[in-house]
Amino acid sequence: MKEIKLIIADDYSLFREGLCSIIGSEPGFHVEGASSWKELEELSLQISPDTVVANWRLFEQGNAANIGDTCPPYQKYHLLVVCEENPEKCLIDAIKAGARGVILKNASKNDLLTAIRAVASGAYYFCKETSAALFSLLLRSTVEEVQDEESSLSKREKVILKYISNGFTNAEIAEKLFISAHTVATHRRNLLQKINAKNTAALVRYASKHGLLN
């Protein structure tokens, strides 16, 4: 098996040196340590690591919103980010920056080794906590997207959509709301555009999906 060249990047000496010692004692690893963003850049140029295990705080210190621009060697290695707490704080930024894994700092030795080997092979790895945080973020984003879609409809448009979905004609809706059939037709066209629907059936499906039929 090919030896994995690894850099442990963390500004806490005890943690960094401890990991270097623990992982370096495992077969198949060549491990170096970096205590700062600058050291990580310089060491990456020197040894061309396969993988970097880095505390996300270092990337923030390095102003690394676009790691590929600020650290060219980054493109040559796989990144495993270590979060100290609350993975939501760094999770999305780390993924956008190109990280292949995110793990908490209190992970066990076995979990860390599993994560390193997975990331070094080109796979993705998220521990139980970061997986749960990622799912929560995606779920929240989906709910907010649906809410944004609904909020784009006026109260009158929602009422008209409900009538349309229940099979009322423009004339019948106009009579119930005391407006003209022409006004109803205009609302119908606006609904089709806002919802990006092609026909009445699509409007009905949208209303059903978003609970607007009750």
Image (spheres, rainbow, N blue to C red):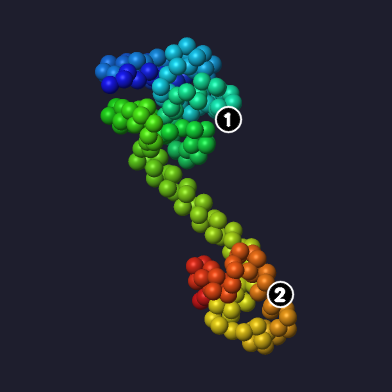
The amino acid type found where label 2 is placed reads Thr
Task: Give how far across and how far down residue 5 sits, in percent.
Answer: 38, 18
Give the answer, above or below, for where 73 lies relative to 174.
above
Q: In the depicted view, which residue is nearer to us: 194 or 157?
A: 194
Q: Say which element carries label 2.
A: helix
Query: Are the residues tagged 1 and 2 within 8 Å (C-beta)?
Result: no
Where is the N terminus found, in terms of image quarters? top left
Q: Residue at x 29, y 19 (%)?
A: 28
Task: Give how far across and how far down residue 140 sits, in percent.
Answer: 49, 52
* Quadrant housing residue 171: bottom right
Give the answer, above or below, for where 39 lies relative to 115.
above
* Quadrant housing residue 10: top left
How much space separates mark 1 and mark 2, taking CA atoms? Answer: 46 Å
Left or right of residue 210: residue 101: left
Query: Tag 1: Cα neighbours inside 10 Å, few (<14), some, or many (≥20)?
Result: few
Q: Say which element carries label 1.
A: loop
Task: Give how far across and how far down residue 173 sits, in percent.
Answer: 64, 84
Q: In the depicted view, which residue is nearer to us: 98 or 23?
A: 98
Q: Residue at x 60, y 68 (%)?
A: 198
Residue 112 seen by the camera: no
Q: Mark 2 = which residue?
A: 186
Q: Which mark is residue 11?
A: none
Task: Give how far across and how far down residue 78 sits, in percent.
Answer: 43, 27
Q: Residue at x 64, y 87 (%)?
A: 172
Residue 101 seen by the camera: yes
Give the answer, above or below, for where 43 lies relative to 63.
above
Q: Which mark is residue 66?
A: 1
